[in-house]
Amino acid sequence: MIFLTRRATFSASHYYWNEAWPPKKNEEVFGRCANRNGHGHNYTLEVTVAGEPDPVTGFVVDLKWLKDVMEQEVLAAFDHRHLNLEVEEFGPGKLIPTTENIAIVAWKRLEPAIRKAAGAQLSRVRVYETPEIFAEYRGGR
Amino acid sequence: MSGLATSAAKAYFGRRYMLCASHRLHADALTVEENRAAYGKCNNPHGHGHNYVIEVLVGGPVDGETGMVMNLVDLDRVVNEQVVERFDHRNLNLDPAFESKVPTTENFSLVLAAILRDALPGGSLEHVRIEETENNFFECYDA
């Protein structure tokens, strides 16, 4: 089994806010991330697929194809957007766009497209919010 | 949270910290020549130092209220109090953890994994990865 990883970057803004909590609790739990005017990051998205190299091409998947899938399923929706306001999975009453939830949402967007491709499966999605902070999701495993 | 319920799903949160420390690789059980052969420059008598990058990965369900595996503030507090304050700008050989253990980065990762396993909420530690230089790294997975 080979694990193949492709990296891409996107820039987006967000804030952390739980509508069910009073403002004071949001500020206590989320600190500066609760500023309702939002703030932004240069995110790095790492997508790892697992499979065996094709005997003819030697590829687990075609990296150009993986790049296009990442672009269509994730970057087109996230890049240069306000995650709370412009991405359907996030926002009031939905998920808070923490790094953890961004990784989970990216997985859910990527997994059906990658499953359709013969011979490879999505193994891991890792999202760096800064070089020092990242979250990863392995499909709940 | 409505819509995507993710509270049961396991996710992982990682954070990188830096600490600067010195060490000397020397095993008392080996002769001078054997130490030299095993450790090379790392056996030089007065030690040397590194900027260690400590990557801590925790795993668990994503809290439905916060969207977090663990609040970064809580993780920072534990790692800073238990690891950074103890080892930063110190000589690893003089720490009690290395009284009878050579402070290789393999052993350092085992020591940090044991410290963090005890200090973090039960079962949340997934791995400790230490980058000794840009080209060397060591990982200890919490079984």
Image: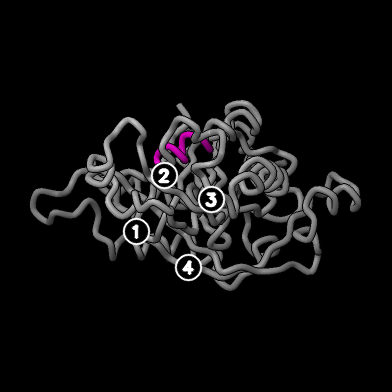
The amino acid sitting under disc 1 is Asn
The amino acid sitting under disc 3 is Ala
Disc 2 sits on a residue from what chain?
B
Question: Is label 3 on the same chain as label 2?
Answer: no
Disc 3 crowd, CA 10 A, few/some/many (<14, 14-19, 20+): many
Location of residue B109 with respect to A22 vertically, above or below: above
Q: Quadrant of residue B28?
A: top left
Work out whether mark 2 precedes mark 1 in sequence or the reverse, and give the earlier one. 2
Which label was assigned to residue A9? 4
x, y percent for residue B40: 27, 51
The residue tagged 1 is: B135
The residue tagged 3 is: A103
Q: Quadrant of residue A83?
A: bottom right
User: Going 36% across and 65% down the picture, which residue do you hit?
Assistant: A68
Work out whether mark 4 precedes mark 3 in sequence or the reverse, and give the earlier one. 4
Secondary structure state at the residue bearing disc 2:
helix
Disc 2 crowd, CA 10 A, few/some/many (<14, 14-19, 20+): many
Q: How far separated are the C-alphas under marks 2 and 1?
A: 13 Å
Q: How many marks?
A: 4
User: Going 39% across and 51% down the picture, which residue do you hit?
Assistant: B45
x, y percent for residue B116: 59, 35
The residue tagged 2 is: B105
Q: How far separated are the C-alphas under marks 4 and 1?
A: 23 Å
Location of residue B133 with respect to B109 vertically, above or below: below
